[in-house]
Amino acid sequence: DAEITQSPRHKITETGRQVTLACHQTWNHNNMFWYRQDLGHGLRLIHYSYGVHDTNKGEVSDGYSVSRSNTEDLPLTLESAASSQTSVYFCASSEGNTPSDEQFFGPGTRLTVL
Amino acid sequence: AQSVTQPDIHITVSEGASLELRCNYSYGATPYLFWYVQSPGQGLQLLLKYFSGDTLVQGIKGFEAEFKRSQSSFNLRKPSVHWSDAAEYFCAVGSHSGTYKYIFGTGTRLKVLA
C-alpha cells in the first residue's frame, strides 16, 4: 500500500544546530506539504511543493527551507534551530493541487530544541 | 481574511452519547470544507469533505457533517460515540485564493468517558 513516512519520529537538538526532517511518499503525488502543529494554533503551513524543483513558502516559512529533487521526497531543513521551532511537524501529500484534493498525512516528527 | 474557528478546545462525552463538534469559517466564496481526525501519536486522517451539493455529508466511522451557509458552519456529528473516537478533531477549509492551501482550525480534543 502507498504511504507517507517521516523520519525521525522524535528528535532532540540544540539551539543553533542544523536539522533535517525527512518525508517520503509512495503515492507518486506531485504535491507535498510541510506543517507544524502547536497548541492553540492548529496546523500551519511551512512550505509546499507542486513538483520536482518547485518550492513555495507558506505562512510560517522563516527559518525553514525545503528542496525537491524527486517526486517522492521533500526534506525540511532548519538552518539554525531555535527554541521557538520546538513543535510537531507533519508532512502531507496530495494528488492534485486544488483545494478539493484530499491531503494524506504522515505520522509526524516531534522536534525539541534545547 | 480567511479563517476557521473551532470554539471548543475540549469536549467530554459519555460513551453512547451523541456528539457535535462546532466549526465556523470565514471565506469569501463557496468553501471546500474538511474534517480530519488525529488519534494520539498519529497523523491526520480525513473523515469527510464538502464541496457542493447535498449539505449533509456522510463520512467514515459513522460521522456526518452539515454545511450551513447562512451560519457559516460545518459542524461534525455522531449519534453514538465509541471510546475509540477519543482523539483530536480538526476542521479545515481549502483555499484557492492566490495559492492552494488548507487553513486549519485549532482543533477540538474529544474525551470519551466509559
Image (tube, coloured by chain):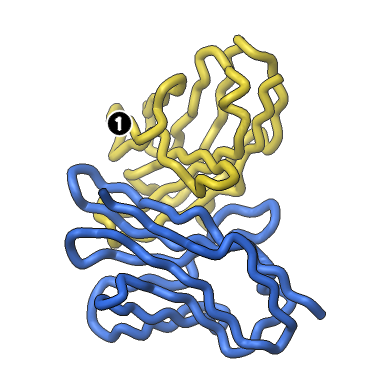
Please report the residue visible at 52 percent of the width from the left and 73 percent of the height from the top.
B21
Q: Quadrant of residue A39?
A: top right
| Residue designated by label 1 | A56
Q: Chain of mark 1?
A: A
Camera-side residue of A71 and A97: A97
Residue situated furthest right in the rendering? B114
Q: Position of residue B112 (x, y in %)?
A: 73, 74
Camera-side residue of B2 and B91: B2
Give the amino acid type for the residue marked by disc 1 in the picture.
Asn
Chain coloured yellow in the rendered structure: A
Q: Is residue A54 left or right of residue B91?
A: left
Residue situated furthest top in the rendering? A16
Q: Position of residue B10 (x, y in %)?
A: 64, 63
Is residue B37 visible from the viewing direction of this image? no
Is residue B74 visible from the viewing direction of this image? yes
Camera-side residue of B94 and A95: B94
Please report the residue visible at 29 percent of the width from the left and 37 percent of the height from the top.
A51
Q: Position of residue B104 (x, y in %)?
A: 43, 53
Q: Is residue B82 left or right of residue A48?
A: right
Q: Is residue A52 above or below residue B57?
A: above
Q: Position of residue A98 (x, y in %)?
A: 25, 54
Q: Quadrant of residue A59?
A: top left
- Check the rendered structure and report the hue given to chain B: blue
Q: Quadrant of residue A16?
A: top right
